[in-house]
Each structure stands twice: as structure tokens, then as C-alpha cells.
């Protein structure tokens, strides 16, 4: 009697999450190359902080692509840390005035909201 061993069937990864993950990865990679040109007054500390943030987003995007929960946790941790530090220590008063306006605040809230809406229906597929 021949007993076939059944191979575990891998669930198909949702296209919406993969598009989101690859978009996040592309965004972070493009932003890393833009860092030295972000501000008129070159600030090594601020640019180093932005590099760390963008590098963390690259790692989070890789976690998204692999459907790892740590990628999602890392993304939201980075988002919260970046937002808090930006509003506590803004780069310049002019930049602060721009980003404190309602459209920018709405934009800052919309990004993680969209990511949550894309990921939550597929949360059980993340391990």
C-alpha cells in the first residue's frame, strides 16, 4: 500500500499586501538617496536619524513581503517614533508650520490607516 505524503499547501499571498510591501520598499529606497538634500541647513544628526528610519522601513517592507508580523510591528513602531520626534523636534519653524496644517496631519494619519485596512483582513496569514 503506497501512502502519499501530502505537502503542505502554501496559501497564496494577497496581491494587495504585496503591492503595498513593494511600494513601501521602493519608497524607502528612494528616500534614502534623497536624505542629504532634505534640508537647507545640513544637519548630520537629523540626516542620520532619517537614514535609520528609512533603513527600518526597508527592513519592515521585507517583513511585509515575507508575511512576518514583526514587519508590521516594526512599521508601526517606526511610524509612531518618527511622528513623535518630528513634532517634538521639528527641523525648522517653517517646516513645522507646514506640517502642522490639517492636510498634512490628515495625510500622516491616512497612510497607516490604509496600511491597516490592507493588512488586517489578511492578518492570519502573517506569522
Image (cartoon, rainbow, N blue to C red):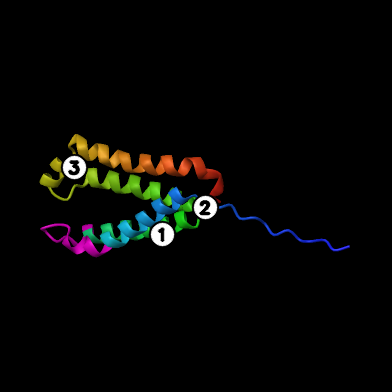
Closer to the eye: label 2 or 3: 2
Q: Residues within 10 Å of mark 1 (few under 14, many from 20)?
A: some
Name the dominant secondary structure of the magenta segment. helix
Residue of label 1: 59
Q: Residues within 10 Å of mark 2 (few under 14, many from 20)?
A: some
**Image: 29 above or below 89:** below
Closer to the eye: label 1 or 2: 2
Under tag 3, what secondary structure? helix
Q: Say whether disc 2 or disc 3 marks the residue closer to the N-terminus.
A: 2
Under tag 2, what secondary structure? loop
Under tag 1, what secondary structure? helix
Residue of label 2: 13
Calculate the distance from the C-alpha at mark 1 to the C-alpha at mark 2: 19 Å
Percent position (x, y) of residue 36?
A: 19, 63
Q: Is residue 63 left or right of residue 45?
A: right
Residue of label 3: 99
Q: Residue furthest top?
A: 102
Circles 1, 2 touching at the beta carbon (< 8 Å): no
Q: Is residue 121 left or right of residue 99?
A: right
Circles 2, 3 touching at the beta carbon (< 8 Å): no
Question: Residue at left 26%, top 61%?
Answer: 48
Percent position (x, y) of residue 110?
A: 31, 39
The magenta stretch is 32-46
Calculate the distance from the C-alpha at mark 3 to the C-alpha at mark 1: 26 Å
Badge number at residue 92: none
In this view, the residue in front, 15 or 99, is: 15
For residue 11: magenta? no
Amino acid at each position: 500500500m503506497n501512502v502519499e505524503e501530502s505537502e503542505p499547501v502554501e496559501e497564496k499571498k494577497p496581491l494587495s499586501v504585496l503591492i503595498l510591501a513593494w511600494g513601501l520598499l521602493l519608497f524607502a529606497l528612494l528616500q534614502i538617496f534623497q536624505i542629504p538634500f532634505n534640508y537647507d541647513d545640513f544637519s548630520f544628526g537629523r540626516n542620520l536619524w532619517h537614514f535609520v528610519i528609512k533603513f527600518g522601513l526597508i527592513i519592515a517592507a521585507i517583513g511585509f513581503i515575507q508575511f512576518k508580523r514583526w514587519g508590521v510591528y516594526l512599521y508601526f513602531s517606526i511610524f509612531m517614533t518618527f511622528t513623535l520626534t518630528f513634532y517634538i523636534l521639528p527641523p525648522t519653524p517653517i517646516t513645522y508650520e507646514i506640517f502642522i496644517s490639517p492636510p498634512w496631519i490628515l495625510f500622516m494619519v491616512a497612510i497607516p490607516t490604509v496600511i491597516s485596512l490592507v493588512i488586517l483582513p489578511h492578518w492570519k496569514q502573517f506569522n
